[in-house]
Image (cartoon, grey):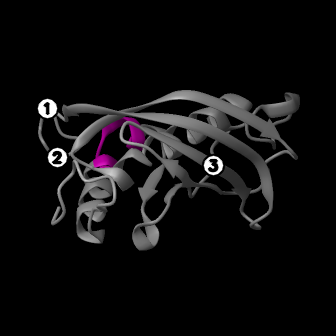
Amino acid sequence: MSDSPSDPSSKPSQADLDRYAALFNQSINLRHFGAHLAFPEGRKTVITLPELRPEHRGGLGSAAAVNGGILAAMFDLAIGCCGALADPSRRCATVQLSMSFERAVTGENMRVEAEVDTKTVSLLFVSARALDGQGRVCARAQGVVKLSTLPWPSGESPAVT
């Protein structure tokens, strides 16, 4: 990053965020889950499930709706990865997550978008929304992300150990 990570006004470059996403997308967890991480325009986190599979479904006792546990995992991932928007070299974790469901997520794909509302030295307050393949908002979440003072073991991202 060109700016100092300790400077609360500094932002990582789009190249830093793209590298973080590329490394994270190689992780066994994201590959197994079928999810993809991106940081469009360096201002938000987007997690996509380009193919909703049978193991993603089962919400409302239906084979069509995405299960709430999957939505919680998608929200946790999107909100937690907002830490990279502050400093991709530092560890971070979702420490609070609150969700509300508006309609069932159905269709063939979905995405979750998350943006930082407020940033302090060690916390991010984040809002997120889950959208179905038609772009309809189906669920919303708010979360708090703790920024650690510890770097990732590899110095690059959680995907590299």
Q: Amino acid at mark 1?
A: Pro
**Circles 3 and 2: CB atoms closer than 8 Å:** no
Seen from the viewer's position, the closer of residues 80 and 33 is 80
Image spot of residue 15 (x, y percent)? 24, 69
Residue at the image point whose x is 59% and y is 37% from the top: 143
- Residue 158 in view here: no
The magenta segment is: 24-31
Q: Which residue is mark 2?
A: 156
Q: Amino acid at mark 2?
A: Glu
* Residue at disc 2, secondary structure: loop
Picture disc at residue 153? 1
Q: Which residue is mark 3?
A: 127
Image spot of residue 146 (x, y percent)? 41, 32
Q: Amino acid at mark 3?
A: Ser
Numbered disc in front, either 3 or 2: 3
Q: For mark 1, does the 10 Å Cα neighbourhood hold few (<14), some (14 to 19), or many (20 or more) residues?
A: some
